[in-house]
Each structure stands twice: as C-alpha cells, then as structure tokens.
Image (cartoon, coloured by chain):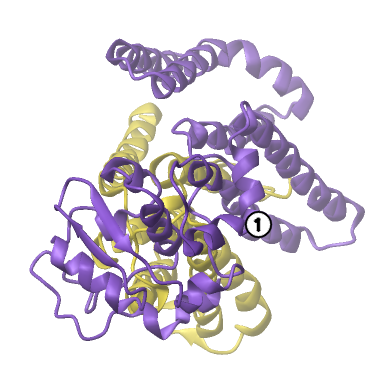
Chain colours: A yellow, B purple
C-alpha cells in the first residue's frame, strides 16, 4: 500500500488510489477490451498522469503553465504524448489480436484520439486538484471525449459510458455533500 | 500484423460510400480479420449467424447492401463473386487465391477460431486451406481460452502477478533502492496498463470481464484497511483483523451480488438480476448505516 498511496495526508491516501482502483474496475466491467473508451481512459490515467508527474518533476521547474503555476509545459506535453502513445499502442495491439474488430483503422482515428488525450491533459493541468482528484477528472473527461469524438464503432459501450459518467458524476456531487452533512 | 493493416488493398478505393455507411468512414475499410472469414465462407455455405460469430461484423453486420458487399470482395483483390440478401445467408461462389494476404500464412490472422473452421463440412478451396494451416501463437491462445476454467485460472495468476508487482516496488522503496515518490508513481504508471494488457488473456465468455475485475477489487480492501490504520494509529495488521467484521455484511452482499452476476451471464435468467440488485442495495446501505 505504501507505494500506491501518499504517506501523510489521510484524505489524499483515501481518494487517489481508491479512484484509481474504481476507475480500473469500471473500465473493465463497462468497456472491456473491445471499446476504445476503456483504453483511452486507463492510458491517460496511468501512463499520461504518471509521465506528467515524473517528467514534470525532472524538467518542469522552469517554464510553468500560465493558468497553473504548479504544472509545467514539460509535464503536460509528456502527459499528452505518453497517454496518446499508450492508447495508440494498446489499440494497435488489441485490434491485432482481434479484440477490437469493428473500429476503423488507427490512422483514421488518430486525430480524434489526440483530441481526447488533449482534453484530458487540459483538465489535468487546470488548478482544480483540490476540488476533483486527478484520478477522477482525467478518466471522466477521457470517457466523455471518447464517447463524443471517437467513431461509434470504436466506442462499443456507449451505454456503458453513460452509466459510468452518470455514476461518477453523481458520486462527485454526493460524496462531498455527505461529508459536509456528516461534519455538520 | 502490420502488413495487414497497412496494405494498400485494404483501403477500399473507388467505391462511393452509400447512405448506410457511417459518417466517420470516408471510405469503406475492411480489416485483415475478414480475410480468413471470407475463406471460411467460401468453404461452405455459412449462415449469416455463424459468420457474425466469426467476427465479420464489419463486413456483414447488415450496414451494407449486398451489392456493396460484392464490391468489397472485388476491391479486396479476392475476385470473389458473392450473392446474398442483406440479412440472410451469403454464398461466395468462387474465390481466387491470388490475394497476397491469403497466400502468405503468416499474415492470415486469427479472429477465425481455427476449430470452427476445421469442423466445417465440404471440400475446402486452397485459400481456406491456407487460412486453416496458419499456426500462430494467437491460435494456441485461442485453444487455451476454450479450456473450462481458463478465466478463473488467468484471474488468479494475474492477481498474484499484480500483488507481486506492487510488493517489488514496496520492497525497493523500503530498502531505499528507489525514491518513495518515484516508486509510487511507477506503480501508478505500470499497474493499470499491465492489468489492461492481461485482458487479452481472458476468453470471449461474457463472464470473463467480471472475473478480470476481481483483480483490482482485491485492492479496495487494502485501501480501506490502510485508511483505517492512518485514522486510528493502529498497525495495518490490526486493522485488517478489525476491518473484516465491520465490513462483513457489505463484503458478503457484494460477493453474493457478484455470484449472481456470474450466474446471470452463464445463463440469462431475469430473477437473478433482481437478486443482484437486492444484494447490491443491501451492500451499499449496510455501509452507510454503519
């Protein structure tokens, strides 16, 4: 557990890994291997976010983003590149194995895929980490973006996307509300 | 695999998309997966249902009128003459072996379960014989996936692998071989994609995804007990011992809901969905009442 969660802050410890696990479970159950939405979601949450953190810490000390002083251009570009690369690799591998067999070829989907990754990167770079955890906002935007931008045959589980969005959306509203009620 | 993707013949050129064609596809595209299926169809008259189960949805999913299907066959360079109705059975009366993808066994991709091809009756044309003789790693994976209990075995192996993976990084962080933050981030970066890569190992059965989802679910209890340990300043082992009784109703109901879902997917029966719903509701409310 120590290597999955941050030591020290309790709520941080609770939320980050918990959302991570919940997103993994949801992506498995709702999208499985035949939808691009799950691939993009997990790629952006794991590969993108991780790369942003590592590259941002190492090279991002100089040029910060104009709208968020704690995030850097280097980190955001790394997140976009790593997330897009991972999503493209997984798409290629899955369709080579035959898991995705209804989608158009990757080359024709790359612009839309890049747009989804860019949207997730943008949301991650916003200074809203205190409001919505990165492990929640990035998957949410990735699912919504894939459902909207990617071709319908590539995002097989549209109802799955809707259920995930509705569920996570209500929980983002309900959980702070319940906490506030509990505290008062 | 890549040659199948990048092959110029794969792109359907010169055919104007009909109204049925989806808006995003500027030109009709077939994947290399359809090749063995075409060969299979040529081998005997295959009903539209079995063709669909072979994975030729993009070709025969009912989106295309028959004449476009014929166009596609010719476009592919397969020189097949096809006839059939949009929803019924489709017969391919002749199929040439000249297509580069069909003549090289290495590129003939799976997606056609080899066992299904072999059981088909009737003499096989050379092209289908080539498709059948393709023995790749994917073919053997296909055979393994068909084993009873394969999903459970895979799930257990993946769960053990995931546990070992996290333990390795924990160990590296605790011995000081790696920075704690870096090790945490590396686990964050690798665990999800590795788990996602393991999806391929599971079978096509509907319950496979539920078995796969059990792997990250195991981590939920770990998260819970570590939170309790932080709150109460107890050791993590104490909390694991104390968390089980308080989480027992929730856990039991979740397990029951899970079993119900698995049963439902094994044999669809609507009352079992009711059972799942009830178990899940009780699980949720037992937690909030607690």
Mark 1 lies on a secondary structure that is loop
Residue A174, compared with residue A125, is above or below; it is: above
B163 with respect to A11 (left or right): right
User: How far across and how far down the image is residue A104, in percent?
Assistant: 33, 69
User: How far across and how far down the image is residue B103, in percent?
Assistant: 53, 73
User: How far across and how far down the image is residue B114, in percent?
Assistant: 55, 48
Q: What count of labels does the image hold?
A: 1
Query: Residue at (44%, 17%) from the top-left corner?
Result: B263
Residue wearing tag 1 = B135
Query: Residue at (16%, 71%) from the top-left corner?
Result: B23
Q: Nearer the viewer, residue B218 or A17?
A: B218
Residue B222, compared with residue B2, is above or below; it is: above
Query: Residue at (31%, 54%) from the top-left corner?
Result: B57
Dot 1: chain letter: B
In this view, which residue lies farthest toward the front?
B123
> Is there any visible trace of residue B82 in the rendered image?
yes
In this view, which residue lies farthest toward the bottom?
A63
Q: Nearer the viewer, residue A72 or B71?
A: B71
> Is there any visible trace of residue B231 in the rendered image?
no
Q: Nearer the viewer, residue A16 or A93?
A: A93
User: How far across and how far down the image is residue B56, in percent?
Assistant: 35, 55
Q: Quadrant of residue B202?
A: top right
């Amino acid at each position: 557990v120590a290597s999955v969660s941050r030591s020290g802050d309790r709520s941080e410890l609770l939320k980050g890994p918990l959302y991570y696990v919940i997103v993994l479970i949801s992506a498995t159950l709702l999208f499985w291997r035949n939808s691009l939405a799950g691939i993009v979601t997990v790629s952006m949450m794991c590969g993108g976010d991780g790369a942003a953190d590592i590259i941002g810490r190492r090279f991002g000390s100089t040029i910060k983003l104009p709208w968020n002083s704690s995030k850097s251009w280097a980190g955001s570009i790394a997140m976009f590149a790593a997330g897009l690369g991972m999503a493209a690799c997984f798409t290629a591998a899955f369709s080579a194995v035959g898991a995705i067999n209804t989608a158009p070829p990757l080359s024709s989907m790359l612009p839309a895929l890049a747009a989804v990754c860019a949207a997730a990167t943008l949301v991650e770079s916003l200074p809203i980490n205190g409001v919505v955890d990165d492990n929640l906002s990035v998957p949410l935007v990735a699912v919504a973006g894939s459902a909207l931008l990617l071709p319908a045959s590539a995002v097989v589980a549209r109802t799955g996307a809707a259920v995930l969005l509705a569920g996570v959306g209500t929980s983002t509203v309900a959980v702070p509300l319940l906490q506030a009620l509990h505290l008062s | 695999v890549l040659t199948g993707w990048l092959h110029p013949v794969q792109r359907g050129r010169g055919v104007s998309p009909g109204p049925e064609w989806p808006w995003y596809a500027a030109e009709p595209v077939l994947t290399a997966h359809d090749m063995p299926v075409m060969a299979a169809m040529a081998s005997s008259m295959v009903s539209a249902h079995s063709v669909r189960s072979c994975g030729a949805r993009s070709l025969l999913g009912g989106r295309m009128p028959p004449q476009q299907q014929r166009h596609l066959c010719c476009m592919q360079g397969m020189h097949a003459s096809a006839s059939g109705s949009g929803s019924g059975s489709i017969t391919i009366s002749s199929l040439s072996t000249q297509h580069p993808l069909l003549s090289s066994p290495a590129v003939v991709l799976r997606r056609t379960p080899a066992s299904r091809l072999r059981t088909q009756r009737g003499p096989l044309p050379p092209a289908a014989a080539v498709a059948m003789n393709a023995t790749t790693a994917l073919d053997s994976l296909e055979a393994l996936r068909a084993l009873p209990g394969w999903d459970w075995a895979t799930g257990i192996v993946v769960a053990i692998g995931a546990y070992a993976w996290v333990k390795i990084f924990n160990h590296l962080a605790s011995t000081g071989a790696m920075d704690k933050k870096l090790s945490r981030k590396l686990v964050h970066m690798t665990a999800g994609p590795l788990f996602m890569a393991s999806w391929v190992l599971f079978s096509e059965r509907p319950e496979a995804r539920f078995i796969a989802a059990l792997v990250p679910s195991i981590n939920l209890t770990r998260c819970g007990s570590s939170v309790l340990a932080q709150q109460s300043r107890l050791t993590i082992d104490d909390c694991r011992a104390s968390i089980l009784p308080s989480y027992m109703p929730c856990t039991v109901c979740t397990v029951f809901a899970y079993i119900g879902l698995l049963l439902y997917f094994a044999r669809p029966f609507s009352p079992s969905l009711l059972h799942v719903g009830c178990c899940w509701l009780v699980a949720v409310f037992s937690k909030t009442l607690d």
